[in-house]
Image (cartoon, rainbow, N blue to C red):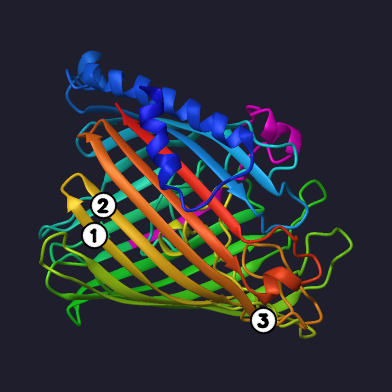
Amino acid sequence: MQSSLVDPVRQGRIFYIRSARFRALMGMLGGSLLAAGHGGEAHAAGMLETALGAPEGLTIKGEVRSRVEGIDGQFRPRVAEDDAMFSLKTTLQVEYDGGPWRVGGELWDARAYGEKSNSSAGTGEVDALEMVQAYVGVDIPVSGGTKARLTAGRFTMNLGSRRLVARQAFRNSTNAFTGVNVQWKSRAGDQLTVLWAMPHIRLPDDVEGIHDNTVRWDTETTDLQFFGASLTKARVFGGSLELYGYGLAERDSADRPTRNRHLFTPGLRLFRAPKAGQLDYDLEGAYQFGRTRATTAPTDRTNLDVSAYLIHAEAGRTFTSGWQPRLSLDFDMASGDRAKAGTYNRFDTLFGARRFDFGPTGLYGAIGRFNTISGGTRLEVKPSRKSDVMVMYRALWLDSKTDSFSSTGVRDASGRSGSFAGNQFEARYRRTLIPEVLRVDTGVAYLAKGHFLKDAPNAPRTGDTKYGYIDLYFDF
């Protein structure tokens, strides 16, 4: 029975990963599918909070996500050419709503197993037993159907498109903050968020601690502060208009060398959500200025003037027939450093998520929001109410020939390796197995390397990159 769950995935892959460790981990996931499937039936009899006899106002919910992923034809320099990993993300959220006030918390446990000693896995995959949320909140009295809420303590958050500030969904660990935020929403749908916070520094951040899944509490410091506001106006040009400005203040110290970033990022976004039978769009632009250092080296004391930018443009249409296909055209551009004296041009994505634009992260994650020019097309269909399929193609170029390409770490300081990075193909399938209890998400990515990723001085000679993953989500 276990093989019946795993074999169709093997047969349907568009690539073959050489590592026997990857195939062994696939078997581990098959076992977890069986175990979670039996657990789901028991869960259907009652939610966790019901089983615990939770009083009115108390919400308790949790999730376990198991993942098997593997990569072959690595694009990063100086890491494993092929790798496989089994990871677990377990979350438990508790909140008590006492009317005008509330108190809550969330435990987030992210662990990884089986990766190679020179794996690319880092703090994005491992953050064991962390209290990412511990907050108090109060409703602010307003009239006319308007709602306002203040939250203080530790919290996670999504702002706007999630390209600059996001609670991670695909990534194993998440961004979290300690501070205060105020959220306001009018009856017409207008929204305003104002915040000041200290971003959490995820620990452990050393190779040994990551491989051992060491439990070390994340920390926050006034040496790293994040602040700003986001205003969304509804019913603008048939959609919504968002205006925002975010500041980041980072101070270097002897025990924590940094690039001493002092950045401000204003931007705007005009968007219309997908809906059957109509056109949708998502247009976003942001400019970044301030000062930073080029490296974290203690000897680097030179502050550079920042001038960087981000552009995203997407237009799509959802058709009403059959599987409600949505076809879209996508374009992204994020600046890279030009290596001009006294200036720095690489865009800093702050605390954003990227899976929904650029494909899987984890052991993959080739594309990020800096030194990238990318265009492509996406097709999404819904074969049933319980499943959806997405396929996407992207062509990839460097914005600056002398900077490293996006998240790969591949660089040619001379600029002689050109600007074409390659073509990325991606496919994803998601299905609900038991409503509100059990769901599966599986996908593949193929990076056909272009001239730059093949011939740059530090580019690994490993051939094209192949990647695949299977996620199983169990909600309780």
Helix, strand or loop at mark 2:
strand
Q: CA distance from mark 2 to mark 3?
A: 37 Å
Q: CA distance from mark 3 to mark 1?
A: 36 Å
According to the image, label 3 marks what residue?
400
Q: CA distance from mark 1 to mark 2?
A: 6 Å
Q: Residue 388, which numbered label?
A: 2
The image quadrant where one finds the N terminus is: top left
| Residue name at image x 17 percent, y 24 percent | 56
Q: Earlier in the sequence, mark 2 or mark 3?
A: 2
Looking at the image, is mark 2 or mark 3 nearer the viewer? 2
In percent of width and height, residue 120 lies at 67, 47
Three-letter amino acid code of the residue under disc 3: Ser
The image quadrant where one finds the C terminus is: top left
Quarter of the figure with residue 442: top left
Task: Examine the rendering and report whether any part of residue 192 can be seen.
Answer: yes
Q: Residues within 10 Å of mark 3 (few under 14, many from 20)?
A: many
Q: Residue 381, which numbered label?
A: 1
Task: Examine the rendering and report whether any part of residue 93 can be seen.
Answer: no
Say if the magenta span includes residue 273.
no
What is the residue that sits farthest to the top in this orientation?
A: 52
Q: Are marks 1 and 2 in contact (CB under 8 Å)?
A: yes
Three-letter amino acid code of the residue under disc 1: Val
Q: Residues within 10 Å of mark 1 (few under 14, many from 20)?
A: some
Q: Earlier in the sequence, mark 1 or mark 2?
A: 1
Nearest to the observer: residue 466 or residue 160:
466
Say if the magenta span includes residue 199.
yes
Three-letter amino acid code of the residue under disc 2: Asp
Rendered view: 420 above or below 227: below
Which segment did they paint magenta? 193-219
